[in-house]
């Protein structure tokens, strides 16, 4: 990318690669197209270069080789977020080649560290150590995007007005185990699977806020058809977030819920993403782990969480911060502790997203544990706020 910018005429003084010795391959690049008004604060174009992990055996094509086929690009990160990084680089190249002189300086920061598990967080590094490189009046970042219809016609260009935050849960069942030739019903895998099945079957109630209600109301006329009518009905029925679960037209909510993108805007979501259990084919499992992602949306999250706990057999009168949960049939008592979010990548991932900015940074983890017969269930929670 720096080579493309140099070829377009960017001098070295306007190119600022950065990294730390501990992680030389996880660095990034800041490029600056100077402005004519030195008193005007810059515009920052921000994108991340790192991608979610992928296994070659799970892909038809090599996920880390860019393939163009049938008018589409295939590869891990082509959408999230290398396409935006490529657009920013191409934009600066074109502006430089055309001799364009912006009033405000245009800065571009390409970083690593956005995806989970990254060793070096580039955006945080720039804020702490190179703030002057990225100081700006505002930034353009990922996740609001244009939408096309089935025929490829432009429908809408969106601007993101809010974002969910997530809570990571690690569920762990511990059991004395034994030999597989003498199986028993008290099995760590069965206990964990039963709890996950109940979580998977549960659907959080519709919960709108001012932003999502206005979005659905405005989009209803643009989208039209069955989806547009459902958006209009849902926005009109939900006088406030607390009423949405009871007053919203169930059919309208069901229609929108068929689209994963719209479903995630309607409610808190929760999904299992990682699972590990057992240690040998001829031994009863002594440990079963899962990490899951629940997303909490906006206001009323404490009330919704209490309702969910009641459905899982938990205590309905505990607070949102100090929760007593019954998971896999086991009551759980809170024991505060400070833990890293993804220990060696084991266990599943419960994430709840809250609307708005949520908690800044990472809070203390929570441990919940209780004996169930001869098994123990442990729940570990982490809350992560938005990035810098």
Image (spheres, rainbow, N blue to C red):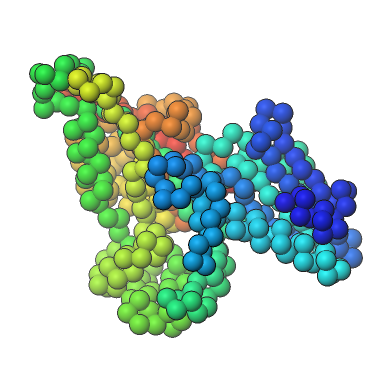
Answer above or below: position of 159 versus 347. below
Q: Compare residues 150 and 258 and report the one nearer the observer.
A: 150
Q: Is residue 328 left or right of residue 217?
A: left
Q: Is residue 198 left or right of residue 369?
A: left
Asked where in the image residue 106 lies, by quadrant, the reply is: bottom right
Q: Residue at x 51, y 52 (%)?
A: 75
Q: Residue at x 48, y 47 (%)?
A: 62
Q: Compare residues 318 and 15 and report the one nearer the observer.
A: 15
Image position, residue 339 (x, y; %): 47, 28
The mark total stands at 0
Image position, residue 378 (x, y; %): 31, 28
Q: Is residue 229 left or right of residue 125?
A: left
Image position, residue 57 (x, y; %): 40, 42
Res 314 visible: no
Q: Is residue 255 left or right of residue 218?
A: left
Asked where in the image residue 86 lies, by quadrant, the reply is: bottom right
Res 239 visible: yes
Q: Residue at x 45, y 67 (%)?
A: 212
Q: Residue at x 35, y 76 (%)?
A: 227
């Amino acid at each position: 990318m720096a080579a493309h910018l140099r070829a377009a005429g960017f001098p070295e003084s306007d190119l600022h690669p950065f990294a730390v010795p501990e992680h030389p391959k996880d660095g990034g690049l800041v490029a600056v197209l100077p402005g004519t008004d030195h008193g005007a604060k810059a515009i920052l174009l921000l994108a991340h270069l790192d991608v979610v992990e992928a296994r070659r055996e799970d892909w038809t094509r090599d996920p880390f080789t860019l393939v163009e086929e049938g008018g589409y690009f295939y590869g891990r990160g082509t959408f999230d977020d290398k396409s935006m990084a490529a657009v920013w680089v191409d934009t600066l190249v074109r502006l430089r080649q055309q001799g364009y002189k912006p009033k405000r300086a245009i800065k571009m920061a390409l970083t690593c560290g956005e995806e989970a598990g990254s060793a070096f967080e580039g955006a945080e590094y720039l804020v702490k150590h190179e703030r002057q490189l990225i100081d700006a009046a505002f930034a353009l970042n990922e996740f609001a995007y244009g939408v096309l219809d089935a025929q490829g016609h432009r429908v809408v260009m969106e601007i993101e007005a809010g974002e969910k935050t997530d809570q990571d849960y690690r569920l762990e069942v511990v059991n004395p185990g034994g030999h597989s030739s003498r199986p028993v019903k008290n099995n760590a895998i069965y206990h964990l699977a039963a709890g996950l099945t109940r979580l998977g079957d549960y659907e959080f109630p519709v919960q709108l806020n001012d932003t999502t209600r206005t979005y659905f109301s405005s989009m209803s006329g643009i989208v039209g058809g069955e989806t547009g009518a459902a958006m209009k009905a849902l926005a009109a029925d939900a006088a406030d977030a607390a009423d949405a679960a009871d007053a919203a037209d169930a059919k309208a909510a069901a229609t929108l819920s068929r689209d994963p993108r719209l479903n995630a805007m309607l409610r808190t979501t929760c999904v299992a993403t990682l699972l590990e259990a057992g240690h040998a084919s001829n031994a009863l499992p002594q440990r079963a782990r899962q990490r899951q992602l629940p997303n909490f949306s906006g206001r009323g999250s404490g009330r919704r969480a209490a309702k969910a706990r009641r459905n899982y057999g938990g205590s309905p009168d505990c607070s949102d911060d100090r929760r007593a949960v019954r998971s896999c049939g086991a009551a759980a008592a809170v024991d505060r502790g400070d833990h890293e979010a993804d220990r060696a990548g084991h266990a599943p991932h419960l994430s709840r997203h809250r609307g708005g900015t949520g908690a800044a940074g990472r809070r203390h983890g929570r441990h919940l544990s209780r004996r169930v017969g001869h098994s123990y269930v442990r729940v570990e929670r982490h809350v992560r706020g938005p990035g810098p």
